[in-house]
Image (cartoon, rainbow, N blue to C red):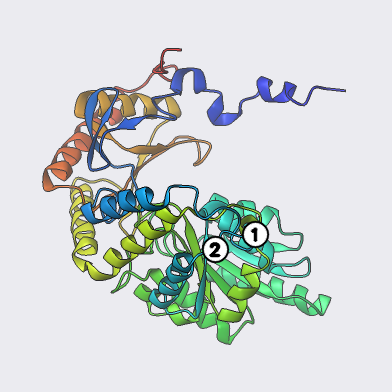
Amino acid sequence: MADIFEKLVKNYGPIGQHRERAHGYFAFPKLEGEIGSRMKFRGKEMIVWSLNNYLGLANHPEVRKIDADASVQYGLALPMGARMMSGNSNYHEQLEAELAEFEHKEDAILMNYGYQGIMSAIDAICGRHDVIVYDAESHACIIDGLRLHPGHRYVFKHNDMEDFEKQMQRASQLIEKQKTGGILVITEGVFGMAGDQGRLKEICDLKKKYDFRLLVDDAHGFGTMGKTGAGAGEEQGCQDEIDLYFSTFAKSMASIGAFLAGPRVIIDYIRYNIRSQIFAKSLPMPIVLGNLKRLELLKTRPELKEKLWENALKLQNGLKERGFDIGKTDSPVTPVYMKGGVEEATAMVMDLRENYGIFCSIVVYPVIPKGHIIYRLIPTAAHTDEDIKLTLKAFSETKAKLDAGAYKVEAIPDMAENK
């Protein structure tokens, strides 16, 4: 019998294979200092484009005060236990009620984390006779949730409505053949990698033709899209047609936790059947009170979202004017598409950080096809015009170097932390 650990040490995976050169620099880097548009990395100041602090709430003085005061008053232990047993409070229920009202839904359930929350929600909703139809570029948390599903699932090409209908026809035919089960459609409000919105309005319009329920993961749209910040459904005028609206607090609220909003009877069912919450400790009181304050600011300070969009458009327009390909983004998420291998990408990242003081996330193979590089920039309300100006200059100069072959190296540069 083989040792189960043996295969792990033989193959660390497509990313892990580079760990001895990359750890602490290209992977698992450590940003230090106050959260903002400028932080320290290995002792050097960087303009940071890797934080989902969309509205700049992470260091908002009112947020910092409530976080500190609540920690002093309650500590991090209260309430103890899972909410169903002993971990509930009036504040948890208040946050749920306010989130439901903000999203124009009857009720909402609070979750400890977005990733395991949506996984467990899919598991609670769908049985073995149900069929799931989902967008091909759905987030990893959705894909992992689908792995828990014992029934059929059909994937449609990203935002391709013709293929969506084809998969809906397959799903409908299967349901008719089984004579039992239903269909859950899953897509995203804003896709976090490419920044384009899901085709929510067009999917909702097809409810007249097909019988299904719609679950939308709007992690990047909540707080950033729509007139009031209620998300991509509000932006597209179809919020009422979204059956279940999900988002995390990790983006625009710069916090921890998540929620799912929808019809009261369905949310109540999920509340009593979602395993990741029933068997997990409740969110600590300081986090709940902090999220109430963040939600209040999200609702009452529209200038924060306005500043975010002002910065996003300045950055995106500046990149386009300089000939960069930023794809089809229609959200603050700003991808920059380039050509090159993993080795070139890491050399370019080093140049950006060491010589230009620019820190941003990079995506390479195996997340995307070989020969392609995506830089994903996340503008926030905290960025300044000077941040944008210096970043555009850095990208123009490093892109010229990339095109000239200056970053061609045989291996990923060894920038791992000393061990």
Task: Work out whether 227 lies above or below 198.
Answer: below
Residue 333, horizontal then vertical, whole percent: 34, 53
Q: Percent x, y for residue 301?
A: 22, 66
Q: Is residue 411 left or right of residue 170?
A: left
The type of residue carrying mark 2 is Asn
Q: Which residue is mark 2?
A: 88
Of 105 and 405, nearer the camera is 105
Residue 339, label in figure:
none
Q: Quadrant of the N terminus?
A: top right
Q: What mark, if any, has residue 278 been given in the picture?
A: 1
**Could you say whether the residue bearing mark 1 is in a helix, strand or loop?**
helix
Q: Nearer the viewer, residue 69 or 300?
A: 69
Q: Using a 10 Å C-alpha cutoff, classify the residue at mark 2 as few (fewer than 14 neighbours), some (14 to 19) or many (20 or more).
A: some
The residue positioned farthest toward the right in the image shown: 1
> Which of the two discs, 1 and 2, labels the residue nearer the N terminus?
2
Task: Report the mark closest to the observer, 1 or 2.
Answer: 2
Does 177 sit above or below residue 329? Answer: below
Q: Quadrant of residue 409?
A: top left
Outermost residue, bottom direction? 208
- Residue 249 can be seen, yes or no: no
Q: Residue at x 24, y 63 (%)?
A: 305
Name which residue lies at 38% across and 75% down. Answer: 102
- The x, y position of residue 251, in whole percent, is 38, 54
Mark 1 neighbour class, 10 Å CA radius: few under 14, some 14 to 19, many 20 or more = some
Q: Amino acid at mark 1?
A: Ile
Q: Quadrant of residue 163?
A: bottom right
Q: Is residue 310 visible?
A: yes
Q: Residue at (18%, 65%) from the top-left corner?
A: 303
Q: Secondary structure at mark 2?
A: loop
Q: Nearer the viewer, residue 306 or 32?
A: 32
The answer to whether residue 306 is left or right of residue 408 is left
